[in-house]
Image: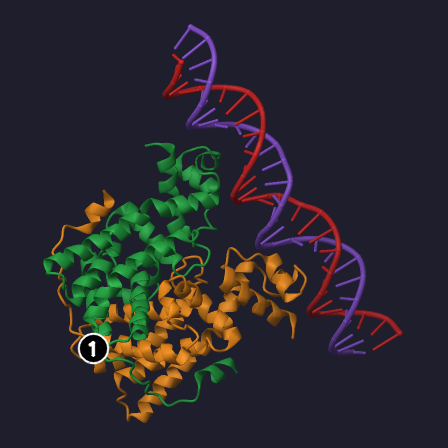
Chain colours: A orange, B green, C purple, D red
Amino acid sequence: MNTKDRILDAAEKLFADKGLSETSMRAITQAADVNLAAVNYHFGSKEALVQAVFMRRANMLNTERLRLLELAQTAADGAPDLESVLEAYIRPALDMSRDKKAARYIKLLGRAYTDPNSHPGEFLPQQYDAVLEKFKPEFARLLPQLDKLELYWRLHFLVGSLVYCMAGTDSMQMSSLCHLCDPNDTEGMIGRLVGFVAAGMRGPSNTAVALDIQSSAQIVAG
Amino acid sequence: MNTKDRILDAAEKLFADKGLSETSMRAITQAADVNLAAVNYHFGSKEALVQAVFMRRANMLNTERLRLLELAQTAADGAPDLESVLEAYIRPALDMSRDKKAARYIKLLGRAYTDPNSHPGEFLPQQYDAVLEKFKPEFARLLPQLDKLELYWRLHFLVGSLVYCMAGTDSMQMSSLCHLCDPNDTEGMIGRLVGFVAAGMRGPSNTAVALDIQSSAQIVAG
DNA sequence: AAAATAATCAAACGTTCGTTTGAAACATAT
DNA sequence: ATATGTTTCAAACGAACGTTTGATTATTTT
Protein backbone atom coordinates (compact mmCIF):
# COMPACT_ATOMS: atom_id res chain seq x y z
CA MET A 1 0.00 0.00 0.00
CA ASN A 2 1.40 3.37 -0.95
CA THR A 3 2.30 6.19 1.37
CA LYS A 4 -0.56 8.47 0.44
CA ASP A 5 -3.23 5.91 1.24
CA ARG A 6 -1.54 4.80 4.43
CA ILE A 7 -1.60 8.40 5.59
CA LEU A 8 -5.24 8.82 4.62
CA ASP A 9 -6.23 5.67 6.49
CA ALA A 10 -4.32 6.60 9.62
CA ALA A 11 -5.59 10.16 9.58
CA GLU A 12 -9.18 9.06 9.04
CA LYS A 13 -9.00 6.73 12.00
CA LEU A 14 -7.34 9.21 14.33
CA PHE A 15 -9.56 12.10 13.26
CA ALA A 16 -12.66 10.04 13.95
CA ASP A 17 -11.38 8.76 17.29
CA LYS A 18 -9.71 11.82 18.76
CA GLY A 19 -10.83 14.77 16.71
CA LEU A 20 -9.09 17.00 14.21
CA SER A 21 -7.18 19.39 16.42
CA GLU A 22 -6.36 16.66 18.89
CA THR A 23 -4.60 14.60 16.23
CA SER A 24 -1.03 15.67 15.55
CA MET A 25 0.96 15.12 12.39
CA ARG A 26 3.35 13.07 14.43
CA ALA A 27 0.58 10.79 15.60
CA ILE A 28 -0.65 10.36 12.03
CA THR A 29 2.71 9.65 10.47
CA GLN A 30 3.64 7.30 13.29
CA ALA A 31 0.40 5.34 12.90
CA ALA A 32 0.90 5.24 9.15
CA ASP A 33 4.54 4.23 9.61
CA VAL A 34 5.82 6.96 7.34
CA ASN A 35 8.15 9.86 7.82
CA LEU A 36 6.86 13.00 9.49
CA ALA A 37 7.53 15.10 6.41
CA ALA A 38 5.46 12.81 4.19
CA VAL A 39 2.17 14.57 4.92
CA ASN A 40 3.47 17.94 3.83
CA TYR A 41 5.14 16.41 0.84
CA HIS A 42 2.10 14.54 -0.44
CA PHE A 43 -0.72 16.82 0.70
CA GLY A 44 0.88 20.19 1.37
CA SER A 45 -0.46 20.84 4.84
CA LYS A 46 -2.53 19.35 7.62
CA GLU A 47 -5.59 21.28 6.50
CA ALA A 48 -5.20 19.92 2.99
CA LEU A 49 -4.98 16.43 4.46
CA VAL A 50 -8.26 16.96 6.28
CA GLN A 51 -9.88 17.94 3.00
CA ALA A 52 -8.41 14.91 1.28
CA VAL A 53 -9.75 12.60 3.99
CA PHE A 54 -13.26 13.93 3.47
CA MET A 55 -13.05 14.06 -0.30
CA ARG A 56 -11.94 10.46 -0.64
CA ARG A 57 -15.29 9.08 0.46
CA ALA A 58 -17.65 11.98 -0.12
CA ASN A 59 -18.82 10.60 -3.43
CA MET A 60 -19.49 7.09 -2.17
CA LEU A 61 -22.23 8.08 0.23
CA ASN A 62 -24.05 10.44 -2.07
CA THR A 63 -23.91 8.35 -5.23
CA GLU A 64 -25.19 5.40 -3.23
CA ARG A 65 -28.07 7.53 -1.94
CA LEU A 66 -29.00 8.54 -5.45
CA ARG A 67 -28.67 4.96 -6.66
CA LEU A 68 -31.09 3.74 -4.01
CA LEU A 69 -33.49 6.58 -4.76
CA GLU A 70 -33.56 5.69 -8.44
CA LEU A 71 -33.88 2.04 -7.55
CA ALA A 72 -36.88 2.82 -5.37
CA GLN A 73 -38.38 4.99 -8.08
CA THR A 74 -38.13 2.42 -10.85
CA ALA A 75 -39.31 -0.38 -8.57
CA ALA A 76 -42.46 1.59 -7.80
CA ASP A 77 -43.13 3.02 -11.26
CA GLY A 78 -41.97 6.49 -10.28
CA ALA A 79 -43.99 6.69 -7.08
CA PRO A 80 -42.08 5.06 -4.22
CA ASP A 81 -43.58 5.21 -0.75
CA LEU A 82 -42.22 7.34 2.06
CA GLU A 83 -40.34 4.52 3.75
CA SER A 84 -38.44 3.67 0.59
CA VAL A 85 -37.40 7.25 -0.01
CA LEU A 86 -36.26 7.63 3.57
CA GLU A 87 -34.40 4.39 3.41
CA ALA A 88 -32.60 5.53 0.28
CA TYR A 89 -31.35 8.51 2.23
CA ILE A 90 -30.62 6.80 5.51
CA ARG A 91 -29.34 3.35 4.58
CA PRO A 92 -26.10 4.25 2.80
CA ALA A 93 -24.86 6.27 5.76
CA LEU A 94 -25.52 3.53 8.26
CA ASP A 95 -24.56 0.71 5.94
CA MET A 96 -21.12 2.18 5.56
CA SER A 97 -20.66 1.65 9.28
CA ARG A 98 -20.28 -2.03 8.55
CA ASP A 99 -17.13 -1.58 6.57
CA LYS A 100 -14.47 -0.99 9.18
CA LYS A 101 -12.69 1.72 7.26
CA ALA A 102 -15.71 3.48 5.86
CA ALA A 103 -17.18 3.48 9.35
CA ARG A 104 -14.55 5.94 10.43
CA TYR A 105 -15.54 8.33 7.71
CA ILE A 106 -19.17 8.13 8.78
CA LYS A 107 -18.26 8.87 12.35
CA LEU A 108 -16.14 11.76 11.20
CA LEU A 109 -18.87 13.11 8.95
CA GLY A 110 -21.42 12.83 11.74
CA ARG A 111 -19.16 14.89 13.91
CA ALA A 112 -18.53 17.43 11.19
CA TYR A 113 -22.18 18.44 11.25
CA THR A 114 -21.93 19.91 14.74
CA ASP A 115 -18.23 20.68 15.01
CA PRO A 116 -17.48 24.08 13.44
CA ASN A 117 -13.82 23.17 13.09
CA SER A 118 -14.50 20.08 11.02
CA HIS A 119 -15.95 21.90 8.06
CA PRO A 120 -13.43 21.31 5.35
CA GLY A 121 -14.17 24.18 3.04
CA GLU A 122 -17.48 24.72 1.34
CA PHE A 123 -17.46 21.85 -1.07
CA LEU A 124 -19.05 19.24 1.15
CA PRO A 125 -22.17 21.17 2.17
CA GLN A 126 -22.85 21.94 -1.48
CA GLN A 127 -22.54 18.31 -2.39
CA TYR A 128 -24.83 17.12 0.37
CA ASP A 129 -27.37 19.79 -0.39
CA ALA A 130 -27.35 18.76 -4.02
CA VAL A 131 -28.40 15.26 -2.97
CA LEU A 132 -31.11 16.57 -0.69
CA GLU A 133 -32.45 18.60 -3.59
CA LYS A 134 -33.09 15.38 -5.49
CA PHE A 135 -35.05 14.00 -2.55
CA LYS A 136 -37.17 17.08 -1.99
CA PRO A 137 -39.58 16.51 -4.91
CA GLU A 138 -40.33 13.04 -3.61
CA PHE A 139 -41.06 14.34 -0.13
CA ALA A 140 -43.22 17.09 -1.57
CA ARG A 141 -45.19 14.49 -3.53
CA LEU A 142 -45.53 12.14 -0.58
CA LEU A 143 -46.41 14.82 1.96
CA PRO A 144 -48.55 17.34 0.08
CA GLN A 145 -50.25 18.49 3.26
CA LEU A 146 -46.99 20.01 4.53
CA ASP A 147 -45.99 23.48 3.47
CA LYS A 148 -42.38 24.05 2.53
CA LEU A 149 -41.38 25.46 5.91
CA GLU A 150 -42.85 22.56 7.82
CA LEU A 151 -41.23 20.06 5.47
CA TYR A 152 -37.82 21.66 5.76
CA TRP A 153 -37.98 21.64 9.54
CA ARG A 154 -38.78 17.97 9.50
CA LEU A 155 -35.87 17.31 7.16
CA HIS A 156 -33.69 19.01 9.74
CA PHE A 157 -35.01 16.69 12.39
CA LEU A 158 -34.36 13.73 10.12
CA VAL A 159 -30.79 14.84 9.55
CA GLY A 160 -30.42 15.37 13.29
CA SER A 161 -31.32 11.86 14.31
CA LEU A 162 -29.33 10.39 11.43
CA VAL A 163 -26.23 12.38 12.28
CA TYR A 164 -26.58 11.31 15.88
CA CYS A 165 -26.56 7.69 14.79
CA MET A 166 -23.64 8.33 12.45
CA ALA A 167 -21.51 9.95 15.12
CA GLY A 168 -22.19 6.65 16.67
CA THR A 169 -21.10 4.57 19.49
CA ASP A 170 -19.47 7.29 21.54
CA SER A 171 -22.47 9.51 21.94
CA MET A 172 -24.92 6.67 22.28
CA GLN A 173 -22.88 4.73 24.77
CA MET A 174 -22.64 7.87 26.84
CA SER A 175 -26.26 7.26 27.65
CA SER A 176 -27.72 4.51 29.76
CA LEU A 177 -30.24 3.95 26.98
CA CYS A 178 -27.58 2.00 25.22
CA HIS A 179 -27.57 -0.83 27.68
CA LEU A 180 -30.38 -2.27 25.64
CA CYS A 181 -29.79 -0.73 22.22
CA ASP A 182 -27.05 -2.31 20.17
CA PRO A 183 -25.40 0.29 17.90
CA ASN A 184 -23.87 -2.54 15.88
CA ASP A 185 -27.27 -3.86 14.84
CA THR A 186 -27.19 -1.79 11.67
CA GLU A 187 -30.20 -3.37 10.04
CA GLY A 188 -32.30 -2.89 13.15
CA MET A 189 -31.17 0.69 13.46
CA ILE A 190 -32.03 1.48 9.85
CA GLY A 191 -35.46 -0.09 10.14
CA ARG A 192 -36.30 1.67 13.37
CA LEU A 193 -34.99 5.03 12.24
CA VAL A 194 -36.88 4.82 8.94
CA GLY A 195 -40.04 3.89 10.82
CA PHE A 196 -39.64 6.65 13.36
CA VAL A 197 -38.92 9.39 10.85
CA ALA A 198 -41.66 8.23 8.48
CA ALA A 199 -44.20 8.50 11.27
CA GLY A 200 -42.79 11.85 12.31
CA MET A 201 -43.02 13.27 8.81
CA ARG A 202 -46.55 11.99 8.31
CA GLY A 203 -47.67 13.55 11.59
CA PRO A 204 -50.16 16.41 11.81
CA SER A 205 -48.88 19.80 10.81
CA ASN A 206 -47.86 22.48 13.25
CA THR A 207 -49.28 21.07 16.46
CA ALA A 208 -49.74 23.73 19.11
CA VAL A 209 -47.54 23.52 22.18
CA ALA A 210 -49.46 22.32 25.17
CA LEU A 211 -47.73 23.44 28.33
CA ASP A 212 -48.85 26.80 29.59
CA ILE A 213 -45.87 27.89 31.56
CA GLN A 214 -43.82 30.84 32.52
CA SER A 215 -41.05 31.16 30.00
CA SER A 216 -38.28 28.79 30.89
CA ALA A 217 -35.80 31.23 29.46
CA GLN A 218 -36.22 33.74 32.25
CA ILE A 219 -36.13 31.15 34.98
CA VAL A 220 -33.14 29.49 33.51
CA ALA A 221 -31.32 32.75 32.94
CA GLY A 222 -31.93 33.97 36.47
CA MET B 1 -17.97 41.24 37.99
CA ASN B 2 -15.31 39.08 39.55
CA THR B 3 -12.46 37.39 37.79
CA LYS B 4 -13.77 33.87 38.11
CA ASP B 5 -17.07 34.65 36.39
CA ARG B 6 -15.43 36.72 33.71
CA ILE B 7 -13.24 33.75 32.88
CA LEU B 8 -16.20 31.37 32.87
CA ASP B 9 -18.15 33.65 30.53
CA ALA B 10 -15.29 34.14 28.14
CA ALA B 11 -14.40 30.45 28.14
CA GLU B 12 -18.02 29.42 27.58
CA LYS B 13 -18.32 31.70 24.58
CA LEU B 14 -15.02 30.68 23.03
CA PHE B 15 -15.56 26.97 23.69
CA ALA B 16 -18.94 27.11 22.01
CA ASP B 17 -17.69 29.13 19.04
CA LYS B 18 -14.32 27.57 18.35
CA GLY B 19 -14.20 24.32 20.27
CA LEU B 20 -12.29 23.18 23.31
CA SER B 21 -8.88 22.36 21.92
CA GLU B 22 -9.03 25.29 19.54
CA THR B 23 -9.43 27.75 22.39
CA SER B 24 -6.19 28.72 24.11
CA MET B 25 -5.72 29.98 27.63
CA ARG B 26 -4.36 33.17 26.16
CA ALA B 27 -7.49 33.68 24.08
CA ILE B 28 -9.67 33.12 27.13
CA THR B 29 -7.78 35.41 29.48
CA GLN B 30 -7.53 38.07 26.82
CA ALA B 31 -11.27 37.98 26.16
CA ALA B 32 -11.95 38.05 29.89
CA ASP B 33 -9.45 40.87 30.32
CA VAL B 34 -7.57 39.08 33.09
CA ASN B 35 -4.03 37.91 33.50
CA LEU B 36 -2.91 34.73 31.82
CA ALA B 37 -2.12 33.08 35.13
CA ALA B 38 -5.59 33.72 36.49
CA VAL B 39 -7.09 30.55 35.06
CA ASN B 40 -4.53 28.31 36.72
CA TYR B 41 -4.82 30.28 39.92
CA HIS B 42 -8.61 30.11 40.17
CA PHE B 43 -9.35 26.78 38.52
CA GLY B 44 -6.08 24.84 38.59
CA SER B 45 -5.86 23.86 34.95
CA LYS B 46 -7.55 24.21 31.60
CA GLU B 47 -9.27 20.87 32.01
CA ALA B 48 -10.65 21.94 35.36
CA LEU B 49 -11.93 25.10 33.73
CA VAL B 50 -13.79 23.05 31.13
CA GLN B 51 -15.44 21.11 33.91
CA ALA B 52 -16.36 24.31 35.72
CA VAL B 53 -17.93 25.73 32.56
CA PHE B 54 -20.17 22.68 32.22
CA MET B 55 -20.96 22.41 35.91
CA ARG B 56 -22.10 25.99 36.21
CA ARG B 57 -25.21 25.45 34.13
CA ALA B 58 -25.70 21.70 34.27
CA ASN B 59 -28.29 21.97 37.01
CA MET B 60 -30.36 24.68 35.34
CA LEU B 61 -31.35 22.59 32.37
CA ASN B 62 -32.21 19.46 34.27
CA THR B 63 -34.05 21.04 37.17
CA GLU B 64 -36.11 23.00 34.67
CA ARG B 65 -36.92 19.80 32.81
CA LEU B 66 -38.08 18.16 36.01
CA ARG B 67 -40.06 21.26 36.96
CA LEU B 68 -41.94 21.21 33.66
CA LEU B 69 -42.54 17.49 33.96
CA GLU B 70 -44.07 17.89 37.40
CA LEU B 71 -46.03 20.89 36.16
CA ALA B 72 -47.43 18.82 33.32
CA GLN B 73 -48.21 15.98 35.69
CA THR B 74 -50.14 18.05 38.22
CA ALA B 75 -51.95 19.97 35.49
CA ALA B 76 -53.22 16.70 34.04
CA ASP B 77 -53.91 14.86 37.29
CA GLY B 78 -50.87 12.63 36.93
CA ALA B 79 -51.54 11.65 33.35
CA PRO B 80 -50.09 14.26 30.98
CA ASP B 81 -50.28 13.62 27.26
CA LEU B 82 -47.29 12.76 25.11
CA GLU B 83 -46.83 16.27 23.76
CA SER B 84 -46.62 17.75 27.25
CA VAL B 85 -44.04 15.22 28.38
CA LEU B 86 -41.95 15.79 25.29
CA GLU B 87 -42.23 19.52 25.70
CA ALA B 88 -41.01 19.25 29.28
CA TYR B 89 -37.90 17.55 27.99
CA ILE B 90 -37.34 19.65 24.90
CA ARG B 91 -38.41 23.16 25.87
CA PRO B 92 -35.81 23.99 28.53
CA ALA B 93 -32.94 23.17 26.19
CA LEU B 94 -34.24 25.33 23.39
CA ASP B 95 -35.60 28.04 25.65
CA MET B 96 -32.16 28.60 27.09
CA SER B 97 -31.07 29.56 23.60
CA ARG B 98 -32.91 32.82 24.09
CA ASP B 99 -30.69 33.96 26.89
CA LYS B 100 -27.54 35.05 25.14
CA LYS B 101 -25.19 33.59 27.71
CA ALA B 102 -27.07 30.38 28.39
CA ALA B 103 -27.29 29.88 24.63
CA ARG B 104 -23.59 29.30 24.51
CA TYR B 105 -23.84 26.54 27.03
CA ILE B 106 -26.56 24.86 25.02
CA LYS B 107 -24.47 25.01 21.89
CA LEU B 108 -21.55 23.60 23.83
CA LEU B 109 -23.63 20.84 25.33
CA GLY B 110 -25.07 19.95 21.96
CA ARG B 111 -21.56 19.58 20.66
CA ALA B 112 -20.46 17.54 23.65
CA TYR B 113 -22.83 14.76 22.66
CA THR B 114 -20.89 13.94 19.52
CA ASP B 115 -17.42 15.26 20.35
CA PRO B 116 -15.48 12.66 22.33
CA ASN B 117 -13.12 15.34 23.60
CA SER B 118 -15.86 17.43 25.13
CA HIS B 119 -16.85 14.90 27.73
CA PRO B 120 -15.90 16.54 30.97
CA GLY B 121 -15.59 13.54 33.24
CA GLU B 122 -18.42 11.22 33.99
CA PHE B 123 -20.60 13.46 36.05
CA LEU B 124 -22.65 14.98 33.26
CA PRO B 125 -23.82 11.77 31.59
CA GLN B 126 -24.96 10.45 34.94
CA GLN B 127 -26.90 13.60 35.59
CA TYR B 128 -28.61 13.61 32.23
CA ASP B 129 -29.43 9.97 32.48
CA ALA B 130 -30.97 10.54 35.89
CA VAL B 131 -33.38 13.01 34.30
CA LEU B 132 -34.23 10.65 31.48
CA GLU B 133 -35.01 8.00 34.07
CA LYS B 134 -37.75 10.22 35.46
CA PHE B 135 -39.25 10.58 32.00
CA LYS B 136 -39.17 6.91 31.14
CA PRO B 137 -42.19 5.87 33.22
CA GLU B 138 -44.29 8.50 31.50
CA PHE B 139 -43.24 7.30 28.08
CA ALA B 140 -43.90 3.71 29.08
CA ARG B 141 -47.39 4.70 30.23
CA LEU B 142 -48.12 6.75 27.10
CA LEU B 143 -46.71 4.22 24.65
CA PRO B 144 -47.59 0.82 26.08
CA GLN B 145 -47.49 -0.81 22.65
CA LEU B 146 -43.72 -0.27 22.44
CA ASP B 147 -41.37 -2.76 24.01
CA LYS B 148 -38.41 -1.39 25.92
CA LEU B 149 -35.96 -1.78 23.09
CA GLU B 150 -38.16 0.04 20.62
CA LEU B 151 -38.83 2.83 23.12
CA TYR B 152 -35.15 3.33 23.89
CA TRP B 153 -34.26 3.53 20.24
CA ARG B 154 -36.87 6.21 19.77
CA LEU B 155 -35.52 8.12 22.74
CA HIS B 156 -32.17 8.05 21.00
CA PHE B 157 -33.73 9.53 17.90
CA LEU B 158 -35.40 12.18 20.04
CA VAL B 159 -32.10 13.10 21.64
CA GLY B 160 -30.51 13.13 18.20
CA SER B 161 -32.81 15.69 16.68
CA LEU B 162 -32.79 17.76 19.86
CA VAL B 163 -29.01 17.80 20.07
CA TYR B 164 -28.87 18.81 16.43
CA CYS B 165 -31.09 21.79 17.20
CA MET B 166 -29.04 22.61 20.28
CA ALA B 167 -25.75 22.56 18.44
CA GLY B 168 -27.62 25.11 16.49
CA THR B 169 -27.04 27.67 13.93
CA ASP B 170 -23.74 26.42 12.62
CA SER B 171 -24.86 22.99 11.59
CA MET B 172 -28.25 24.11 10.37
CA GLN B 173 -26.97 27.02 8.37
CA MET B 174 -24.55 24.66 6.73
CA SER B 175 -27.55 23.33 4.91
CA SER B 176 -29.61 25.06 2.28
CA LEU B 177 -32.68 23.96 4.20
CA CYS B 178 -32.05 26.88 6.46
CA HIS B 179 -32.88 29.47 3.87
CA LEU B 180 -36.47 29.05 4.94
CA CYS B 181 -36.11 27.77 8.50
CA ASP B 182 -35.29 30.39 11.09
CA PRO B 183 -33.20 28.89 13.92
CA ASN B 184 -34.03 31.93 16.05
CA ASP B 185 -37.74 31.16 16.01
CA THR B 186 -37.45 29.21 19.23
CA GLU B 187 -41.16 28.81 19.84
CA GLY B 188 -41.74 27.55 16.33
CA MET B 189 -38.85 25.16 16.63
CA ILE B 190 -40.11 23.74 19.93
CA GLY B 191 -43.60 23.27 18.58
CA ARG B 192 -42.46 21.61 15.41
CA LEU B 193 -39.95 19.36 17.11
CA VAL B 194 -42.47 18.27 19.74
CA GLY B 195 -44.99 17.53 17.01
CA PHE B 196 -42.50 15.62 14.90
CA VAL B 197 -41.16 13.50 17.73
CA ALA B 198 -44.62 12.83 19.15
CA ALA B 199 -45.76 11.48 15.82
CA GLY B 200 -42.57 9.49 15.48
CA MET B 201 -42.95 7.89 18.87
CA ARG B 202 -46.60 7.04 18.29
CA GLY B 203 -45.76 5.41 14.96
CA PRO B 204 -46.19 1.70 14.30
CA SER B 205 -43.64 -0.57 15.89
CA ASN B 206 -40.75 -2.14 14.03
CA THR B 207 -41.75 -1.44 10.45
CA ALA B 208 -39.98 -3.71 8.04
CA VAL B 209 -37.51 -2.12 5.67
CA ALA B 210 -38.91 -1.89 2.19
CA LEU B 211 -36.08 -1.67 -0.29
CA ASP B 212 -34.85 -5.01 -1.53
CA ILE B 213 -31.34 -4.16 -2.51
CA GLN B 214 -27.86 -5.47 -2.66
CA SER B 215 -26.11 -4.52 0.53
CA SER B 216 -24.89 -0.97 0.25
CA ALA B 217 -22.01 -1.83 2.50
CA GLN B 218 -20.25 -3.96 -0.09
CA ILE B 219 -20.81 -1.51 -2.90
CA VAL B 220 -19.68 1.36 -0.77
CA ALA B 221 -16.65 -0.48 0.52
CA GLY B 222 -15.58 -1.59 -2.92
C1' DA C 1 -1.35 50.02 62.19
C1' DA C 2 0.69 45.68 61.59
C1' DA C 3 0.46 41.08 60.08
C1' DA C 4 -1.47 37.70 57.17
C1' DT C 5 -3.94 36.11 53.50
C1' DA C 6 -5.57 36.54 48.73
C1' DA C 7 -5.22 38.10 44.13
C1' DT C 8 -2.84 40.04 40.17
C1' DC C 9 0.97 40.64 37.28
C1' DA C 10 5.08 40.28 33.80
C1' DA C 11 8.16 37.00 32.59
C1' DA C 12 9.86 32.75 31.73
C1' DC C 13 9.59 27.53 31.79
C1' DG C 14 9.70 23.16 29.08
C1' DT C 15 6.78 20.84 25.47
C1' DT C 16 4.53 20.12 21.49
C1' DC C 17 2.86 21.81 17.37
C1' DG C 18 2.99 22.30 11.88
C1' DT C 19 6.32 23.10 8.69
C1' DT C 20 10.84 23.40 6.24
C1' DT C 21 15.37 21.93 4.89
C1' DG C 22 18.96 19.52 2.33
C1' DA C 23 20.99 15.32 1.86
C1' DA C 24 20.27 10.34 0.89
C1' DA C 25 17.77 6.60 -1.35
C1' DC C 26 14.94 5.08 -4.95
C1' DA C 27 12.79 4.97 -9.46
C1' DT C 28 12.53 5.85 -14.28
C1' DA C 29 14.11 7.20 -18.87
C1' DT C 30 17.38 7.92 -22.25
C1' DA D 1 25.35 3.36 -17.25
C1' DT D 2 24.29 7.90 -16.69
C1' DA D 3 21.07 11.45 -15.94
C1' DT D 4 16.65 12.98 -14.29
C1' DG D 5 12.89 13.15 -11.49
C1' DT D 6 10.53 11.34 -7.32
C1' DT D 7 10.21 9.91 -2.73
C1' DT D 8 12.06 9.25 1.94
C1' DC D 9 14.64 10.61 5.84
C1' DA D 10 16.79 12.76 10.21
C1' DA D 11 17.17 17.09 11.93
C1' DA D 12 15.93 21.46 12.90
C1' DC D 13 12.89 25.77 12.63
C1' DG D 14 9.93 29.35 14.83
C1' DA D 15 5.54 29.72 16.91
C1' DA D 16 2.08 28.61 20.16
C1' DC D 17 0.70 25.86 23.84
C1' DG D 18 -0.38 25.02 29.24
C1' DT D 19 1.85 25.90 33.29
C1' DT D 20 4.96 27.87 36.95
C1' DT D 21 7.44 31.34 39.29
C1' DG D 22 8.37 35.13 42.41
C1' DA D 23 7.58 39.77 43.02
C1' DT D 24 3.92 43.18 43.61
C1' DT D 25 -0.50 44.92 44.80
C1' DA D 26 -5.28 44.42 47.36
C1' DT D 27 -7.86 42.79 50.75
C1' DT D 28 -8.90 40.96 55.14
C1' DT D 29 -7.82 39.89 59.98
C1' DT D 30 -5.97 40.90 64.38
Answer yes or no: is residue B142 visible: yes
Residue A51, relative to residue B64: is it above or below? below
Report the front residue among B136 and A130: B136
Return the x and y of residue A43 as percentages of the image width and height: 59, 64
What kind of element bears circle 1? helix
Residue A125, relative to residue C17: is it above or below? below
Q: Report the amino acid beneath label 1.
A: Arg
Residue drawn at (29%, 57%) of the image: B131
The quadrant of the image that shows the N terminus of chain A is bottom right
Does B162 sit left or right of A61 as displayed?
Answer: left
Chain ID for label 1?
A: A
Report the front residue among A85 and D1: A85
Does B178 sit left or right of D1 as displayed?
Answer: left
Q: Which residue is mark 1?
A: A202
Return the x and y of residue B95 as percentages of the image width and height: 23, 53
Residue drawn at (29%, 83%) of the image: B207
Residue C28, relative to residue B89: is it above or below? below
Residue drawn at (33%, 59%) of the image: B129
